[in-house]
Amino acid sequence: MQQRTQPDQDPTIPPTVGIAWCAWHEAYSNTARPVRDSSGARLFACYSCREAYDLPLIADDQQ
Ligand SMILES: [Zn+2]
């Protein structure tokens, strides 16, 4: 039996259940998380696009 550890995992970012559509670079990404765009709409953005556009994560299902 082998154990896998993920020492690089950031505890502030919830784990994904799969891949999601990144609305910024318009492709699927397994690092996409829900964010709000400038109009307040809820969209997914991947890690690279969040870094590039300084997009805030939506932590929970809040209004
Ligand atoms: Zn992206």
Image: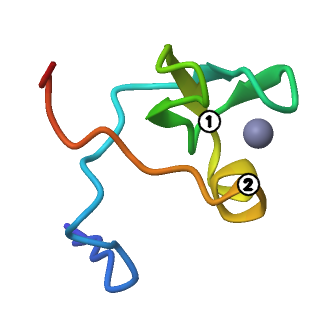
Residue 7's spot in the image, x, y percent? 32, 85
State the SS at label 2.
helix
Does mark 1 have its CB less than 8 Å from ligand 1?
yes
Which residue does the numbered mark 1 point to in the structure image? 45
| Label 2 environment density (alpha carbons within 10 Å; few <14, some 14–19, many ≥20) | few
Question: Where is ligand 1, by quadrant?
Answer: top right
Residue 11's spot in the image, x, y percent? 20, 70
What's the residue type where badge 1 is placed?
Ala
Please tell me which residue is depicted at 68% across the width and 64% down the height of the picture: 51
Please tell me which residue is depicted at 56% across the width and 36% down the height of the picture: 32
Q: Foreground residue, 38 or 49?
A: 38
Residue 31's spot in the image, x, y percent? 57, 45
Count of labels in the image: 2
Furthest residue to the front? 39
Q: Foreground residue, 7 or 44?
A: 44
Which residue does the numbered mark 2 point to in the structure image? 53
Asked if marks 2 and 1 touch (Cβ < 8 Å), the reply is yes
| Label 1 environment density (alpha carbons within 10 Å; few <14, some 14–19, many ≥20) | many
Q: In the figure, is residue 37 to the left or right of 11? A: right
Q: Quadrant of the C terminus?
A: top left
